[in-house]
């Protein structure tokens, strides 16, 4: 700051201009750079180009027909975009919370994670179980054996494989302890789900609990009111709670599924379904030796703030699409 004040005191406004810099000056004009960024920030469909997302050659081809824009190479074009916050080759998907009474249904699960149900604290001895299934895990035998890491070498596994069938992984998570019971039936369904539930509910801590809250998704093996009645008929202290549509992230067992996918299934080199099943069940046993409950911090208040932001965004978008008529 002192330097700039001194330059202003010595030469006035001229002193604030950039001094000559070393190196070759920029050859690509500011107008060309702006045109590159402006085109990259549009969806290709909006310009009539039948592609899903921009690449360097595609952008260059479209810019070639724009008047007063100098010719540049694909390398220069990509260098311009690399220095800009917008990266048209990167994209992500998202989904809005949908379904009737989404917030009210999600709040029940979030409140359970915070130790409340129906506006009241959980009773001593109440348990919370999170159930779901990975319906189709393939056993793939690599055509050549997987090679371990070595000096200067990564683990290497064959790209091609032979299919050896598939099975399902059913699992539950005790939200308070982190323990995971599981089974590996050939497929999902009402019978495998109820069989695993029976194995869990036979344990004293669940059989003698005042209430056992069973959080499930919307799979066919435990969908709708029929599944709620079926579970309650078998175990009167069990209360089934479904996640809202498109809200599997509320079900904590999904965290465990991501762990077992990364640690046990990948890179998926199994010679038979028995080997795959044995690995999955052995991993669950190993996991339970040091299992801890997940630190769940997302609350119903956080969800309410999210829903307010979504509502505000939708209102702003509706206003932009259908602006109100101006008064005469």
Image (cartoon, helix red, strand yellow):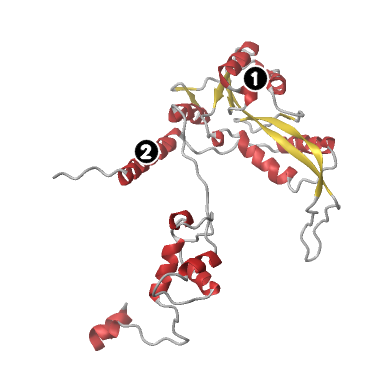
- Helix, strand or loop at label 1? It is helix
Can I make out residue 118 in this image?
yes
* Direction from residue 3 to residue 28 in the image, left or right: right
- Mark 2 surroundings: few (<14), some (14-19) or many (≥20) residues within 10 A: few
* Direction from residue 323 to residue 195 in the image, left or right: right
* Direction from residue 51 to residue 100 in the image, left or right: left
- Mark 1 surroundings: few (<14), some (14-19) or many (≥20) residues within 10 A: many
Q: Quadrant of residue 196?
A: top right
Q: Is residue 263 above or below residue 110?
A: below
- Helix, strand or loop at label 2? It is helix
Name the residue beneath numbered marker 2: 311
Rendered location of residue 159, percent (x, y):
78, 53
Rendered location of residue 323, percent (x, y):
27, 44
Which label is found at residue 206?
1
Residue drawn 47% across the image and 30% down it: 99
Residue drawn 43% across the image and 65% down it: 37
């Amino acid at each position: 700051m002192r330097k700039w004040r001194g330059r202003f005191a010595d030469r006035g406004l001229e002193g604030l201009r950039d001094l000559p810099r070393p190196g070759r000056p920029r050859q690509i004009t500011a107008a060309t750079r702006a045109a590159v960024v402006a085109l990259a920030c549009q969806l290709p469909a909006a310009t009539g180009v039948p592609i899903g997302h921009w690449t360097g050659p595609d952008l260059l081809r479209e810019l070639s027909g724009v008047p007063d824009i100098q010719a540049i190479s694909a390398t220069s074009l990509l260098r311009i975009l690399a220095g800009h916050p917008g990266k048209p080759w990167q994209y992500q998907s998202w989904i809005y919370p949908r379904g009737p009474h989404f917030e009210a249904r999600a709040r029940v699960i979030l409140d359970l994670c915070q130790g409340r149900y129906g506006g009241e604290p959980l009773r001593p001895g109440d348990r919370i179980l999170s159930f779901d299934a990975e319906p189709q895990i393939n056993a793939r035998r690599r055509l050549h054996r997987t090679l371990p890491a070595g000096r200067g070498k990564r683990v290497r596994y064959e790209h091609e494989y032979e299919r050896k069938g598939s099975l399902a992984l059913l699992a539950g998570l005790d939200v308070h302890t982190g323990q995971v019971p599981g089974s590996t039936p050939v497929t999902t369904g009402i019978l495998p789900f109820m069989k695993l539930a029976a194995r869990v509910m036979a344990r004293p801590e669940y059989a003698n609990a005042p209430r056992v809250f069973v959080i499930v998704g919307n799979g066919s093996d435990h969908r709708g009111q029929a599944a709620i009645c079926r579970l309650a008929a078998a175990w009167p202290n069990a209360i089934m709670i479904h996640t809202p549509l498109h809200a599997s992230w509320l079900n904590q067992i999904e965290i465990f599924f991501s762990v077992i996918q990364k640690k046990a299934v990948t890179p998926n080199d199994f010679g038979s379904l028995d080997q795959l099943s044995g690995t999955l069940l052995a991993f669950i046993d190993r996991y339970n030796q040091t299992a801890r409950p997940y630190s769940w911090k997302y609350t119903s208040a956080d969800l309410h703030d999210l829903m307010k932001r979504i509502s505000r965004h939708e209102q702003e978008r509706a206003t932009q699409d259908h602006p109100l008529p101006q008064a005469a």
